[in-house]
Amino acid sequence: MEDYLIHTRESFDKIADSFDREDYSNEILQWMRSEVYEIYSHYFKEGDTLLELNAGTGIDAIALASRGIKVFATDISGRMINNLRTKIRKENLDNFIKTDILPFDDISRLNESNFDGAISNFGGLNCINNFYNLSKDLADKIKPGGRFVASVMNSFCPWEILYFLSKGKPSEAFRRFRNNGIEANLSQHKIKSFYFSPKEFASQYKEHFELERISSLGLFTPPPYLYGIYYKAKFLVKLFMKTDHLIKGIFPFNRIGDHFIIVLKRKLRDRI
């Protein structure tokens, strides 16, 4: 494992115990999560089995399990997965959620396959910049015709550009365009992060997947790290949320924003 990924694992271990509290207290993040869940509901149904990447403490896995969907949840952070296992025992979800401590490059180690789909939420995939192995491994694990739904941090975020320009920080305003990534803040810890346009991201999966859908997530709505704006201008931010919901799938708006949600369909052919 590369040194920066070891650091990433250690950083997520450190924030595991405060993760849920910070997540649930962020109104912008909760709105974003509801937008992602709407897309999950469109593609996945009761009885399906999903592979989850960067599952964290299992917020999404538990939400999906409550809808009768089985989830195999994986994450690089052992502390995150241990917290999820505690939740599984507490809520008696052993029949719906399985877990394993796995980085992206070890997905091939899973004995399970024939998943109806896979998910990755809120920028976990921005922790790496080469998806060749992951694309092949996901193709091996997902049924032909199954969907991979990922929420990814976009390289073009107008809010971030305008915010940092207003603070007189041009280097920060355009930091997402750096090809070698940046050291991004995560609850006072630094995480190596890479940013992609929807086109760049989809191109790395094109051998095994075809692009089906792109939705913007947070074009007019401020990024979650600017959640203080929500409390200062709640009515306006809620209006932004409604606007984002209406235009999220319309070109060219769906190509820009804090995140994008991308749906990739496993190609209907023999697996490679």
Image: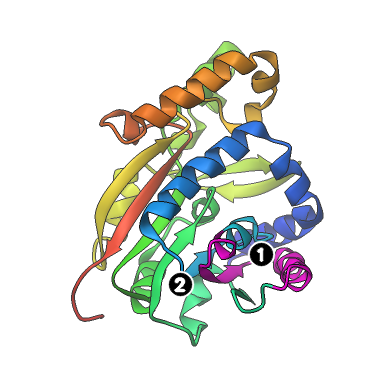
The residue beneath circle 1 is 6
The residue beneath circle 2 is 47
For label 2, the crowd category at 10 Å Cα-Cα, with few meaning under 14, some 14 to 19 and many 20 or more, is few
The stretch in magenta equals 64-92
Return the x and y of residue 50 as percentages of the image width and height: 47, 69
Q: In the displayed structure, does residue 229 sit left or right of residue 248?
A: right
Q: In the displayed structure, does residue 259 sit left or right of residue 185?
A: left
Residue at the left extreme? 269
Q: Element type at marker 2?
A: loop
Q: Element type at marker 1?
A: helix
Residue at 49% in and 76% down:
107
134 and 190: which is toward the camera: 134
Q: Amino acid at mark 1?
A: Ile
Return the x and y of residue 6 as percentages of the image width and height: 66, 64
Return the x and y of residue 115 as percentages of the image width and height: 41, 75
Q: Amino acid at mark 2?
A: Gly
Which sits earlier in the primary sequence, circle 1 or circle 2?
A: 1
Observer-side mark, 1 or 2, equals: 2
Q: Quadrant location of the N terminus? A: bottom right
Q: Is residue 33 magenta?
A: no
Picture quadrant where residue 79 is located: bottom right
Q: Relative to residue 5, is residue 35 depicted above or below?
A: above
